[in-house]
């Protein structure tokens, strides 16, 4: 096995403030607008013309009655309290951002050797020394960097698979370079993944299983359909398929934004990271403010604070998306639901999960905001004999929570070993 060298930290040194959360102006504006909206709604509430959520209507009516009884002074005190609370909440978010930007945590895991590379793509070797375990090709999303699957010593899916007797190889897509700027999904699947599969077959003499996370699961599925004779099984983690399930409004939004995004791609050649981050933020506009306000309350040197910083460093270390891939995913997948509708093609062939003839496992988080269960379940149900396991975490939490070892790492490793040893 190649000698493993310590890798330079991937996060900034403590005297170099981080840039995130990206795009920061958007997150701060969304939070400030929400708080100002609370104050702006007061005149409507006072006049009785503000519609309320039915679950809150009775309490709102009770509070309004008490304020009306208190007269102008009561309403003035209430308005002042709303203003003070708004300022307090916004300052808490700003405090959390400042603490994050100057936190001393740095990622310092050892470098893993790249056994194969082409353009910006590498195949990283996570096998333990002298390991003879069955091979597993792990495919992450093209949008975020691969080390979400190797975030820290305590939170690493690929190291956990290696420790459980498997031989993991992790795809590192990296940012698209000149060679990849015009790539389609077919170029990544029928080109890069095909060649990495050939390399693993030649290196180990064994057929690997595939593990795909998020969008990487869709890529792995397409590869499994193309190369079924060379693959022993397929495991999908939080993999979307019905992109309109629970997200119909976002499909309409992306169709509306399509011409503008396409014009941007024509100029830049890629879809920039900050645009991608803004689109994902639209799924839950208040999430960033909530989590940074909560971070400000943590002890700075606690394990929870370090875990938060490690995850945010990864989230803000994403990459631009090659222009043609962005069009396929945002317009084709999210906008037109091409996967679910049977219109997504790789090298001219429809990617049809019903045609998959190999063991398949789908691990689906119950509280996933990025890929709701109703988006992932149709893919599992389309494959005859597929096994489905629901886990309690969210999209990222399934990999990084304290339960990840017992709910994801061990069941996945056991299933892979059974599939690979058949």
Image: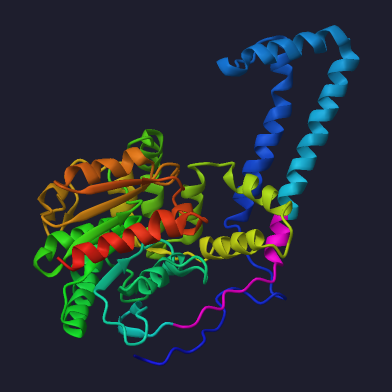
Does residue 184 appear in this view? Answer: no
Front-lying residue, 257 or 408: 408
Query: In screen coordinates, is 254 left or right of 191?
Result: right
Residue 370 magenta-highlighted: no
Indicate the quadrant containing the C terminus: top left, top right, bottom left or bottom right: bottom left
Q: Does the magenta segment cover residue 100?
A: yes
Q: Nearer the viewer, residue 1 or 115?
A: 1
Q: Is residue 211 left or right of residue 30?
A: left
What is the x, y in percent for residue 86?
76, 36
Q: Which residues are magenta?
A: 96-111
The residue at the point 64 percent across, 46 percent down is 289
Q: Of all residues shown, which one is farthest toward the right? A: 73
Q: Say which residue appears at 69% left-offset and 71% top-offset.
A: 104
- The location of residue 337, given as percent across then percent down, is 27, 42
Q: Vertical placement of 98 versus 194: above or below?
A: above
Specify the quadrant that holds the N terminus. bottom left
* Prevailing secondary structure of the magenta residues: loop
């Amino acid at each position: 096995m190649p000698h493993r060298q310590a890798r330079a930290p991937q996060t900034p040194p403590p005297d170099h403030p981080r840039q995130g959360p990206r795009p920061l102006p958007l997150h701060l504006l969304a939070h400030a607008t929400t708080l100002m909206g609370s104050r702006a709604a007061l005149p409507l509430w006072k006049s009785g013309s503000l519609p309320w959520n039915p679950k809150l209507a009775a309490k709102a009516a009770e509070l309004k009655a008490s304020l009306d009884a208190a007269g102008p002074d009561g309403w003035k005190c209430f308005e002042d309290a709303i203003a003070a609370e708004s300022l307090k909440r916004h300052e808490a978010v700003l405090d959390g951002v400042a603490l994050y930007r100057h936190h001393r945590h740095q990622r310092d895991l050892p470098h893993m050797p790249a056994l194969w590379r082409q353009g910006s793509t590498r195949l990283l070797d996570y096998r333990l020394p002298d390991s003879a375990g069955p091979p597993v090709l792990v495919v992450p999303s093209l949008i975020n960097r691969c080390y979400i699957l190797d975030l820290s010593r305590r939170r690493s899916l690929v190291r956990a698979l290696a420790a459980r007797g498997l031989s993991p190889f992790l795809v590192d897509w990296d940012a698209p370079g000149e060679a990849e700027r015009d790539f389609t999904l077919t170029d990544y699947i029928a080109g890069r993944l095909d060649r990495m599969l050939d390399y693993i077959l030649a290196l180990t003499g064994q057929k690997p299983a595939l593990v795909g996370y998020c969008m990487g699961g869709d890529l792995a599925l397409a590869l499994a359909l193309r190369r079924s004779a060379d693959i022993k099984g397929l495991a999908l983690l939080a993999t979307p398929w019905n992109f309109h399930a629970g997200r119909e409004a976002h499909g309409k939004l992306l169709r509306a934004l399509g011409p503008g995004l396409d014009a941007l791609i024509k100029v830049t050649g890629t879809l920039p990271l900050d645009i991608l981050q803004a689109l994902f933020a639209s799924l839950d506009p208040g999430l960033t403010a909530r989590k940074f306000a909560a971070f400000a309350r943590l002890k700075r040197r606690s394990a929870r604070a370090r875990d938060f910083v490690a995850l945010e460093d990864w989230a803000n270390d994403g990459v631009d998306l090659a222009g043609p891939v962005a069009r396929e995913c945002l317009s084709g997948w999210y906008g037109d639901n091409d996967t679910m509708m049977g219109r997504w093609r790789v090298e001219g062939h429809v990617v049809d999960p019903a045609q998959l003839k190999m063991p398949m496992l789908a691990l689906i988080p119950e509280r996933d905001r990025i890929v709701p269960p109703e988006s992932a379940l149709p893919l599992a149900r389309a494959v005859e004999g597929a096994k489905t396991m629901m886990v309690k975490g969210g999209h990222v939490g399934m990999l990084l929570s304290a339960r990840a070892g017992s709910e994801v790492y061990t069941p996945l490793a056991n299933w892979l070993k059974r599939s690979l040893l058949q």
